[in-house]
Image (spheres, rainbow, N blue to C red):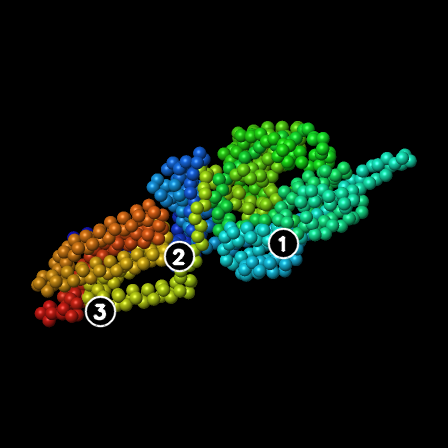
Amino acid sequence: MILLRFKGIVIVIICIIIAALVISINPLKINNWERGNKDTIFGMVLGLDLIGGTHLVYEIKSKTGENPSVEDAEGVRKIIERRVNEFGVSEANVQLIGSPPDKILIQIPSQSQDKITFSFSNKDPDASLITDKLHQMGIEDFQIEKVENDFVLTFNTSLDQQKIDEIKNFLMNSLEVVIKINFSPKRIELPTGETKLEFPNKLDIDAVLEDEKIEYLSFTSKEFGAFEFTINNYGYDKDSMNDEIVSALSKLDYNFVNLEADGALNTFVASGGIQSAKRLIGSTAQLEFRIRECGDTKPEDLDESVWELVKCFDPQFYNEVATGLESKNLTDASPGTNAEIGQPVVNITFDDEGSDTFYEITDRISRTGDLLAIYLDNEELITPGADKAISGGSAYIYGRDINATRAREIAIQLRSGALPATLTLVQERNVDAVLGSESLSKSLFAGTIGFVLVLLFMMAYYKVPGVVSSLTLIIYVGFVLAIFKIIPVTLTLSGAAALILSIGFAVDANILIAERIKEELLSGRNLLNSISIGFNRAWPSIRDGNVSTIITAIVLFWFGSRFSTSVMQGFALTLGLGVLISMITSFYVNRILIVIVSRFNIVSNTNLYIPVVKKNKNFGD
């Protein structure tokens, strides 16, 4: 029996040491396994209602539009988890909901500041103008800076998609764009036999612009076929508007040379925080390579210079052919900066099959003059040509809207693989922390004071059993925190309430044991027998009460899972685990400790085991 007790205390000591190490080391790393967050108390994973963040729910649909299979849903979950973890989103919670699962819940704690990076063609507006306009829109908490050719807006509060769209519309609609156009002269034979060079005049250009309903604020004629006109409040999209203007000017009987749009919004990328995370999550990440066969027959009504501009870029003239080269042919993708073009790029490496296909594609377009159109989720990234066949299985992707952050996002998406299903965002909610950092600290302090007062009461009232029970409760809290950190369990405000409730169950169990020991002592039994019988008689009540609570927690968890109520799930999981651990510590750990303590002569007096108000003077020996 003594040997058994010795083994028991050794096991308890080992568990205490392990729990202490788990709690104190942040983050806890063993090979690729990692737990803990150095920014939170004890490294616990805190829920959105404690630290703030974003709650996203996506509906999962198979590529045929039907509900996904269980395997596809689990595949989506794993890929999204890889994406957010690799991107560095701290402690994101990714879980399937529904039975069978048809939605995925992603809870993302507060992230880095949201940023919007944008640039203009050739001419930048004054930064103060942008600042004043954003203030008029009710956006106050931000900073603006110029980084090389880009403006960077950094926001101290999170942005939703509506606000991002409003900012983009402002940049497109409220700033002046100066259109510069040039024509080559038309040669006119005079009756005298001389040749005259003639350029279009303002009236000619004004007429075709009016036909296309292109309005301008001012128009300036320069020399030698050069003109400038200013557009404002037009919703100027560089690509579409340039096409409209080129199409209008091509109606003139003059050789159109080129067009520049000074001040047009050139790039616009929202990044940082939740925006980057949403792009990572929602994108299918299907990379496609298509051969773009440029038009070969010029329409009679188009000038040759215009034809060269549109034959490879106007959908009515070109044709695209699938190549079979896709994301599945990639072995690696990484962000970088290409020294030759001075732009952020995504470096990609193909497998053997992909390398051979890429060589054949580039060989073909180098001979035909066609282009290679590269798409990500049906969105065109870039359409380059090739001077020769490219071997080696490596390439890089760049584009107008690919900055360093976007390049990193695309690389992560390509490495994690394409989603086997499509995702539709059905719920987005920004969650402010119910308790700020100061309130949370005060709440923890108040909770600690309350816990200490409970321990002091138990020690003062129940004497030795109270001291041992207090020590057991401290061990219990340590075990709970360690296990919650290892699993890990996300501790929400409701979960914290459940944890406090489970501590109450543990206190109740220890009080029940102390009372049973007291009753056995008052009936005349010796100390060791009273302890043994007291524990045995207290166990059925402890077991029945705690098991019924655990069953209730399981039912609550099921309801929470069924109806996508994460608050209920958090409460149920924390309560169930807390009560289960309290059963072990209250009965097993408490029993070992009190038996060992009772063997010391200094605390073997039975009066030390009877509550003060129940003290019996006959038990003083």
Give the distance between the C-alpha atoms of the residues marked 3 and 2, in whole angstroms: 37 Å
For the point 54% across and 52% down, the residue is 164
Mark 3 touches mark 2? (CB < 8 Å): no
Crowd class of label 3 (few under 14; some 14 to 19; many from 20; radius 10 Å): some
Residue 362 falls left or right of residue 258:
left
Crowd class of label 1 (few under 14; some 14 to 19; many from 20; radius 10 Å): some
Q: Position of residue 397 (x, y in %)?
A: 58, 40
Residue that label 3 marks: 460
Taking depth in this image into account, of 63 and 405 the one nearest to the observer is: 63
Mark 2 touches mark 1? (CB < 8 Å): no
Residue 151 falls left or right of residue 1:
right
Q: Secondary structure at mark 3?
A: helix
Q: Position of residue 564 (x, y in %)?
A: 36, 48
Taking depth in this image into account, of 488 and 132 the one nearest to the observer is: 132
Residue that label 1 marks: 174
Instruction: Please tell me which of labels 2 and 1 falls first in the chain.
Output: 2
Would you identify the image quadrant in which residue 430 lies? bottom left
Residue 301 falls left or right of residue 498:
right
Residue that label 2 marks: 49
Q: Position of residue 66 (x, y in %)?
A: 41, 36
For the point 67% across and 42% down, the residue is 212
Q: Amino acid at mark 3?
A: Ala
